[in-house]
Amino acid sequence: MVFAEIEYHKHYSDFHAELLAFVDQHFSQVRSGIQGDSCICIFDGEEKVVIDTFTSMRHQIKSPKSGIHVQKVIDTLRLGFQLYVYEKPELEAHEDA
C-alpha cells in the first residue's frame, strides 16, 4: 500500500543520494539501491517500509500494512521534506484490490 509521496522538483535519480543520506541519519537498518529506479528499505525487526519509484516518478512510502513503523518513517521524513500523505492508503497497480 502507498501511504505517502515525497514532493520535490528534480529527477528522482538526482534526489536519491540526498534522501538516502537523510534516512541513514535517522534509521539504523537501511538497505538501498538505484538501478533504473530508486529503492530504499527501512527495517525495524520484521517490519519493513519501502521508499521507491517503482510505480511513480517520485518516491513513494510503501508498506504491506499500516502501523507504528510506517508512521514513524512518515513522521521522520516530514522533518526534512514536504510529503503528500494519502488520506487512505492506495493500492499499488500490482496489488490485488
Image: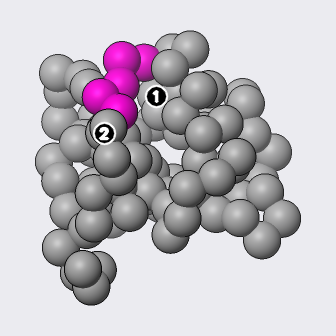
The residue that appears at 17% across and 53% down in the rendered structure is 56
Which picture quadrant has residue 32? bottom right
Three-letter amino acid code at disc 1? Glu
The answer, for residue 38, to whether it is visible in the render is: no
Tell us which disc is closer to us: 2 or 1: 2
The answer, for residue 1, to whether it is visible in the render is: yes
Task: Look at the picture and state if 74 lies above or below 82.
Answer: below
Which picture quadrant has residue 73? top right
For the residues bearing labels 2 and 1, Cβ distance under 8 angstroms: no
The residue that appears at 35% across and 25% down in the rendered structure is 83
- Percent of width and height locating residue 72: 66, 36
Disc nearer the start of the sequence (2/1): 1
Give the prevailing secondary structure in the magenta stretch: strand
Say which residue label 2 marks. 86
Three-letter amino acid code at disc 2? Tyr
Which picture quadrant has residue 39? bottom left
Q: Secondary structure at mark 2?
A: strand
Q: Residues within 10 Å of mark 1 (few under 14, many from 20)?
A: few
Please indicate whether residue 37 sits to the left or right of residue 71 in the image. left
Q: Which mark is residue 62?
A: none
Callout count: 2
Q: How is the image coloured?
A: one colour
Residue 31 or 80: which is nearer the viewer? 80
Residue 32 or 59: which is nearer the viewer? 59
Q: Which mark is residue 18?
A: 1
Q: Quadrant of the C terminus?
A: bottom left
- Percent of width and height locating residue 60: 34, 47
Q: Is 7 one of the magenta-colored residues?
A: no
The residue that appears at 31% across and 39% down in the rendered structure is 86
For the record, the magenta segment spans 81-85
Please indicate whether residue 68 sits to the left or right of residue 4 in the image. right
